[in-house]
Image: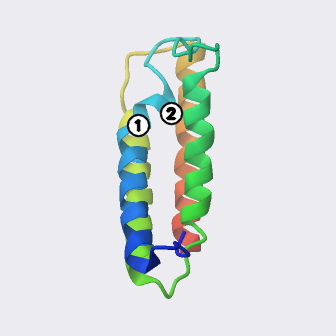
Amino acid sequence: VAHSVRGELGAKMLVSASTAVLLDSFTLVIGPIGVPVSILREDNGEDVTNICREKMFRMISVLSTINPKNKDLKNEASITLSKIAALCKSENAVGGVSGVAASKRKILLKEIWDTCVQANTAL
């Protein structure tokens, strides 16, 4: 992350832009509420929700490897991870939906929350 050919400023801008996209696409990661199957598909049949989910976990993993000496990037990563964890908590608080889809959603939200907490601790 911190080794951009454009230098540290370029790396910070790239991290800021990518974390903003990650936060804005959180609903794509967890999928629509109450829908037991993934209805979001690419033209070639690929599951958009699953693609976003895989990329989100990869981004969280990368954010956890930022060098602690790089305070700006570390702070940006920590803020993003905290926001994702808060989104998981608020999404988990949404009630009224039950069944298999709801239980899978809760498990996913818990997994995302755990991963964010571990990544933030690693920073």
Q: At 43% from the left edge and 19% from the top edge, which residue is drawn?
A: 33
Relative to the observer, which residue lies in front, 92 or 45?
A: 45
Relative to the observer, which residue lies in front, 109 or 1?
A: 1
Figure quadrant of the N terminus: bottom right
**Residue under pointer 1:** 25
Task: Give how far across and how far down residue 66 sits, in percent.
Answer: 55, 74
**Is any part of residue 78 visible from this angle?**
no
Task: Give how far across and how far down residue 50 sits, in percent.
Answer: 61, 29
Residue 91's quadrant in the figure?
top left
Relative to the observer, which residue lies in front, 66 or 12?
A: 12
Query: Is 86 situated left or right of 46 in this image?
Result: left
Q: At 44% from the left edge and 66% from the top edge, which residue is drawn?
A: 77
Query: Is 8 situated left or right of 123 in this image?
Result: left
Task: Give how far across and how far down residue 37 sits, in percent.
Answer: 59, 11
**Is any part of residue 80 visible from this angle?**
yes
Q: Is residue 61 above or below residue 53?
A: below
User: Given contact means CB atoms under 8 Å apart, are the residues at marks 1 and 2 in contact?
Assistant: yes
The secondary structure type at the circle numbered 1 is loop
Three-letter amino acid code at disc 2? Val
**Residue under pointer 2:** 29
Q: At 40% from the left edge and 71% from the top edge, which residue is drawn?
A: 10
Relative to the observer, which residue lies in front, 95 or 9?
A: 9
- Neighbours of disc 2 within 10 Å: few (<14), some (14-19), many (20+): many
Q: Is residue 40 above or below residue 7?
A: above
- Neighbours of disc 1 within 10 Å: few (<14), some (14-19), many (20+): some
Residue 87's quadrant in the figure?
top left
